[in-house]
Amino acid sequence: MKIKSLADSFAYGSVIKKGVPVAIIGKPNAGKSSLLNALLNDNRAIVSSIAGTTRDTIEDTLTIKGIQFRFIDTAGLRETTDEIEAVGVAKTKEKALKAKVLLYLYDRNDANLNEIIKDINEFRRDDLILIPVESKVDLNKNAANEFDSALTKELNSKKILQPIKISTFDKISIESLKKFLFNQVSQMASNQDVIITNIRHYDALQNVLKAILNIKNGLDQKISGDLLSVDINEALMHLGEITGEITTEDLLGNVFANFCIGK
Ligand SMILES: Nc1nc2c(ncn2[C@@H]2O[C@H](COP(=O)(O)OP(=O)(O)O)[C@@H](O)[C@H]2O)c(=O)[nH]1
Ligand SMILES: [Mg+2]
């Protein structure tokens, strides 16, 4: 039955199975691999002061307060003549496009404002939670300056979140980042974004499926139309939870045609 495979596809759908994709991007040496390791509390990715160390993407999952996240460490964004690294950078952009959340890392001690603004403008999308992350704050010696105010202004004007400050040497900052991520994603979910919609769709589809099986059994057993209509209405009601518009009788034909009752 089509509806069953549809429901199954949601059950095994990417978000549920693989976690909310969170891509960690930024210049080489911004501290991306260190952040991945700190989040996972594991030496998953190689960390070094040599720019271009991470060439391929590295992914791993972590559950934060019941939501599964899939963190993706990427090759640093830079022009490169190294063939393998260039493939890595292209892959970074691809991962960024598919991510639900982007952690854009920059090291304020080694940052170029125009570059950050250019990157942020390149990656921002309406359906993306873009979180600027200021890394290595343990190294910050300078007080807030024009860099900070210009970045704040730019982010505000684009309605992008203000930077979260972290140091991978400071566990508390990493825990705060995790909390922040959880809050952002659960907020997105309650705003009826894809994630919860999928879970709701999945639930609704399961209910539709149950009702349709009842209808099928009812038809097999030749029960009365009145009794059948209870299950038909049930199926329509749950379909309506997805489409918000299935209420009229003329859609019944559609339901029967599209959902292959009896097969
Ligand atoms: N002081 C300090 N150094 C850091 C921090 N995070 C990373 N580093 C160092 O920055 C360099 C680059 O880190 P890495 O995680 O490999 O950066 P990536 O190229 O963005 O993946 C390494 O020498 C790290 O030890 C931090 O929070 N504070
Ligand atoms: Mg790296």
Image: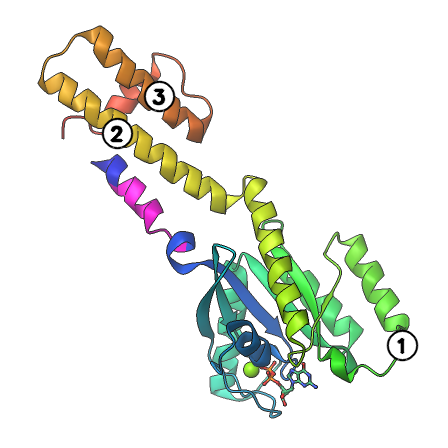
Residue 129 horizontal side relative to residue 155, left or right: left
Looking at the rendered structure, the kind of residue marked 3 is Leu
Mark 2 closeness class: few <14, some 14–19, many ≥20 residues within 10 Å: some
Task: Measuring from the top left, give residue 88's x and y in whole percent.
Answer: 49, 78
Q: The residue tagged with tag 3: helix, strand or loop?
A: helix
- Residue at image location 60% in from the left, 92% down from the top: 50
Label 3, label 1: how far apart the Cα atoms are: 61 Å
Residue carrying label 2: 210
Identify which residue, 128 or 42, lies in the foreground.
Answer: 42
Q: Which mark is residue 143?
A: 1
* CB under 8 Å between discs 3 and 2: no
- Residue at 42% x, 24% y: name it: 240
Q: Quadrant of residue 263?
A: top left
Q: Within the magenta stretch, is there residue 185?
A: no
Residue 44: x percent and y percent?
A: 47, 80
Residue 14 on image: x %, y %: 39, 55
Residue holding disc 3 = 236
Per the rendered image, the range of residues in magenta is 5-14
- Badge 1: few (under 14), some or many (20 or more) residues near its Cα, within 10 Å? few
Up-down relation of residue 50 to residue 67 (above or below): below
Q: Indicate the colouring scheme.
A: rainbow
Amino acid type for the residue under numbered disc 2: Lys
Q: Quadrant of the N terminus?
A: top left
State the image coordinates of residue 190 (x, y, percent, origin top left). 57, 41
**Would the CB of label 1 be found within 8 Å of ligand 1?**
no
